[in-house]
Amino acid sequence: MELTEPLRTRGLSTADYDYELEPERIAQEPASERDRSRLLIVERATESIRHAHFGEVADLIPAGDVLVLNTTRVIRARLLGTRDSPQGAPAEVLLLKPLADASGLTYEALVHPGGKLRAGRRVYIANDLSVEIVAVTDRRTRLVRLLTPLAVDDALARYGHVPLPPYISRADTVADAERYQTVYAAQPGSVAAPTAGLHFTEELLERLSARGVRRADVLLHVGAGTFKPVETEDPADHPMHEEVYTIGEESARRINDAHATGKEIWAVGTTSVRTLETAADERGLVHPGSGETRLFIRPPYTFRATDKLITNFHLPRSTLLMLVAAFAGYELTMHAYRTAIDSGYRFYSYGDAMVIL
């Protein structure tokens, strides 16, 4: 039989990462207990899939292996206000990252409505906080300046909202201030949580430590680009936004020592993977340091420093889903997603998890 089209490897086109998900499957609230979320266990070697609960992850990680955690902390980056005065029309500012500015008050931000908030306009938040639109950037974000007599941290703590993802269709609550944060969050700077880490409790981390599992902390501040779908037909044409990362000397040493002695590295979340793979050289050695990464991991990709992956379920056509496919293989990844959908798993930030062995 003669082929009318050349054969194409699945997983190389953005359209390959489409899948159907009923809206009610998108978790709007976290599980009643962090470690009682469901866990889909995917084995690459056998292509087998089985079901568990997240707390059982402690039975999967052998002594001497290293668990890599992203210790970023989500800031109250969402500011809700009105245009120019307390009586103005509604407006919203999402602070993305602070900029190098002596005042410490200048940020890159997303704004809504974008067409109305041009340079020179202000968003009134409260009597002691307004946001001035300074400029429009090449990528249509805004440079903004916070106008406040308060310290920035105090202003955001008082008036900022937890920046829940756009697919959570409700306002943030007091409970979100705790639950949309990992129990080990330390350094403020993210506008989205490293959601695979939301399933861990202090008790679960203590159990892992008691079993001899070692821990290595890394840092990657998650930007709003994590929610941006890939809109180009070829993923290679997708512009990745930069994210700031840091790996300390002790964490790098612990990871490298584990690999040197035949132990494995378990990355908690795609952010930990991107940090590890950015810092690893061709030999797989992880180098300490800080910087910005635009690394876009997608098939085909050879992993240098990551052996196992704990992750949530990700949006269709997302860079995060493509990273998972690069790690587990495209066909197995999509089979796992179909299994999760058929089995009633909850999806996205407050949803269930899977571990890829």
Image (cartoon, rainbow, N blue to C red):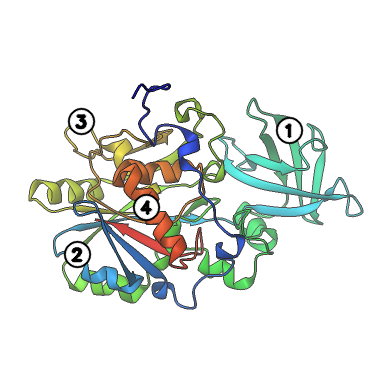
The CA distance from mark 3 to mark 1 is: 42 Å
Which residue has dot 2 on it? 213
Give the residue type at disc 3. Glu
Does 19 sit left or right of 298 as displayed? Answer: right
**Up/down of 4 relative to 148, above or below:** above
Where residue 184 appears, x then y in whole percent? 39, 64
Which residue has dot 1 on it? 134
Where residue 2 appears, x then y in whole percent? 36, 21
| Mark 4 or mark 3: whose residue is earlier in sequence | 3
Residue 202 in view, yes or no: yes
| Mark 1 or mark 2: whose residue is earlier in sequence | 1
Q: Between 136 and 11, which is closer to the camera in this rendering?
A: 11
The CA distance from mark 1 to mark 4 is: 47 Å
Which residue has dot 4 on it? 335
The CA distance from mark 4 to mark 3 is: 31 Å
| Mark 1 vs mark 4: in front | 4
Mark 4 residue element: helix
Most extreme residue toward the front is: 1
Give the residue type at disc 2. Val
Res 282 label: 3
Q: Quadrant of residue 212?
A: bottom left
Residue shown at 47% from the left, 68% from the top: 344
Does 333 sit left or right of 64 as displayed? Answer: right
| Mark 4 vs mark 3: in front | 4
Q: Between 25 and 219, which is closer to the camera in this rendering?
A: 25
Residue 71 in view, yes or no: no
| Mark 1 or mark 4: whose residue is earlier in sequence | 1
For the C terminus, give its image quadrant.
Answer: bottom left
